[in-house]
Amino acid sequence: MNQEKYIEDLKEIKQMMDRSSRFISLSGLSGVAAGVFALIGAYFAWQILYSNFDYQAYDRILLTTEQLTQLVAIGLGTLILSLGSGILFTILKTRKIKQNIWDSQTKRLLINLFIPLLTGGIFCFLLILKGYIGLAAPVTLLFYGLALVNASKYTLTEVRSLGILEIVLGLLATYFIGYGLLFWSIGFGLLHVIYGIIMELKYKS
C-alpha cells in the first residue's frame, strides 16, 4: 500500500515538473484543423499556378500582380485560420485542465517557434517576388520544420518528430522540385491531420 502511494506521489511530482518546464496544453484538434485548412489552401494555389504553368522549376516564373495577390491572400488566409483554430482549441483545452495559458513556458515556446518561422516566411515571400515559385514549398517546409524542432524542448516531445518529418519533406521537395505543392500538401495538410488525431487520442483528458 505504501509502495503504491509512493509511486502515485512520484507521478504527481513528474506531472508538476512537466507543467513547470513545458507547455503541454496543445490540442490535437488544432492540428487537424490546420491540416484541413492547408489542404484547402493548397487546392486553390494549385488552381492559380497550374492554370498557366505546367511545371514548377528553379527557372523564374513571372506572376501577374493578380496572381501574386491571390497567392499571398491564400497563404495569409490559411495562416490566420490555422492560428485562429489553434488558439481556440488550445484555450478550450487549457480551461478544461485548469492550466494557465499565458506563462513563461508559453512565451519561450512562441519565441523559439516564431524566430525561424518569420525568417522563413519573409525569405519565401522574397523568392515569390523574384519569381522562384518552385522553391517556395521547400523553403516553407524546411523553416517550419526547424521552427518545430527549435520549440519542441518547451512542449510535447511529439512536436520534435513532426518537425523532423517536415524537414525531410522539405529536402525531398527541393530534390523533386516539380512536385513542391504536393510535398507542401503532405507536410502542412496530411501530416498535421495525422499528428492531430494521434495527439487527441493520446492526450485526451
Image: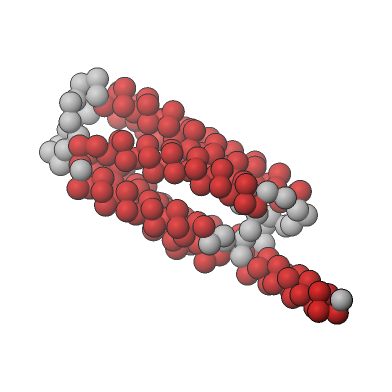
Q: Residue pushed farthest left?
A: 59
- Scheme of image coloration: secondary structure
* Residue at image location 37% in from the left, 26% down from the top: 43
Percent position of residue 27, x then y: 62, 47
Instruction: Judge from the rendering whether residue 59 lies leftward or rightward of residue 50; answer left or right.
Output: left
- Front-lying residue, 53 or 15: 15
Percent position of residue 155, x then y: 57, 61
Percent position of residue 42, x then y: 37, 31
- Front-lying residue, 142 or 118: 142
State how many labels appear: 0
Instruction: Judge from the rendering whether residue 10 lies leftward or rightward of residue 198; answer left or right.
Output: right
* Residue at image location 62% in from the left, 51% down from the top: 202
Up-down: is 47 above or below 42? above
- Front-lying residue, 109 or 25: 25
* Residue at image location 27% in from the left, 39% down from the top: 180
* Residue at image location 12% in from the left, 38% down from the top: 59
Viewer can see residue 65: no
